[in-house]
Amino acid sequence: MAVKIKLKRIGKMREPHYRIVIADARTARGGRAIEEIGQYHPLHDPSVIQVDSDRVQYWLGVGAQPTEAVAAILRVTGDWQSFKGEPAPPAMLVAEPKADKKSVFEAAAKEAAGLDEKAATTPKAKKKAAPKADKADKADKAAEAPAAEPEAKKATDTQAGDQGADATDAAETPVEAPAPDAGDAPASA
């Protein structure tokens, strides 16, 4: 049985991901594998290549043949050179690990707050000082207000009774001055 180190395609359309697998040479590209020894994601920037070097060295040692694509990947990682006894390639470009979202948010919040955690995001509105009034003036105004209301109500009722159909309009309009008594002069329509 001829054993190959090849790529097994996974992923979506137009977004390929590959697994580096050990498989029989007669199996299909996405078929059954003997062992998975790595991953390759070509569309990431930079490309993601993860290879289990110990297992690659073992399978190369027992005679597994890499395909052209896998051989290129093994040259980038340096596994092919270490198998052949050649000098190692220059250092591989490795993507920086992504920052934790929570720590990024906390840093942005501190920066926006100006490093003052106790300060509010918007300043509090200042209250205007109310002019001081005598308690006696307030009491006089309170005493006058209830007395004025019944007189206004009487006037509204009298006008509503005299005008007939316009009673609803008269009830809605406020009366500023008390109306003359109904007995003195009848209202003309």
Image (cartoon, rainbow, N blue to C red):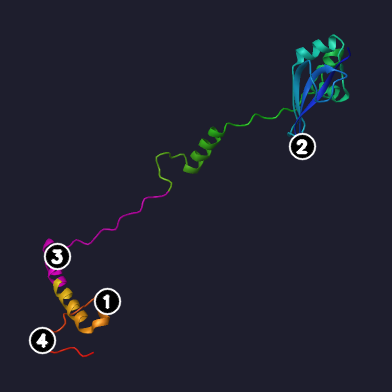
* Amino acid carrying mark 3 in the image: Ala
Q: Can residue 87 be seen here?
A: no
Vertical placement of 181 versus 71: above or below?
A: below
Quadrant assignment for the N terminus: top right
Q: What span is colored magenta in the figure?
A: 122-149
- Residue 95 in the image: state x and y as whole percent: 70, 30
Mark 1 to mark 2 CA distance (whole Å): 75 Å
Q: Residue at x 13, y 61 (%)?
A: 135
Disc number at residue 168?
1
Q: Secondary structure at mark 1?
A: helix
Q: Residue at x 25, y 79 (%)?
A: 167
Mark 2 to mark 3 CA distance (whole Å): 81 Å
Quadrant assignment for the C terminus: bottom left
Near-viewer residue (177 or 87):
177
Q: Nearer the viewer, mark 2 or mark 3?
A: 2
Residue 119 lies within the magenta run: no
Do the residues bearing badges 1 and 2 touch, measured as CB atoms within 8 Å? no
Q: Nearer the viewer, mark 1 or mark 2?
A: 1
Residue neighbourhood size for the residue with mark 1, other residues' Cα within 10 Å, grouped as few (<14), some (14–19), many (≥20): few
Do the residues bearing badges 2 and 4 touch, measured as CB atoms within 8 Å? no
* Amino acid carrying mark 2 in the image: Met
Q: Residue at x 76, y 18 (%)?
A: 37
Which numbered disc flags the more N-terminal residue, 2 or 3? Answer: 2
Residue tagged by mark 4? 183
Residue tagged by mark 3? 142
Which numbered disc flags the more N-terminal residue, 1 or 4? Answer: 1
Mark 2 to mark 4 CA distance (whole Å): 96 Å
The image quadrant of residue 40 is top right
Mark 3 to mark 4 CA distance (whole Å): 31 Å
Which numbered disc flags the more N-terminal residue, 3 or 4? Answer: 3
Residue neighbourhood size for the residue with mark 3, other residues' Cα within 10 Å, grouped as few (<14), some (14–19), many (≥20): few
Residue 146 lies within the magenta run: yes
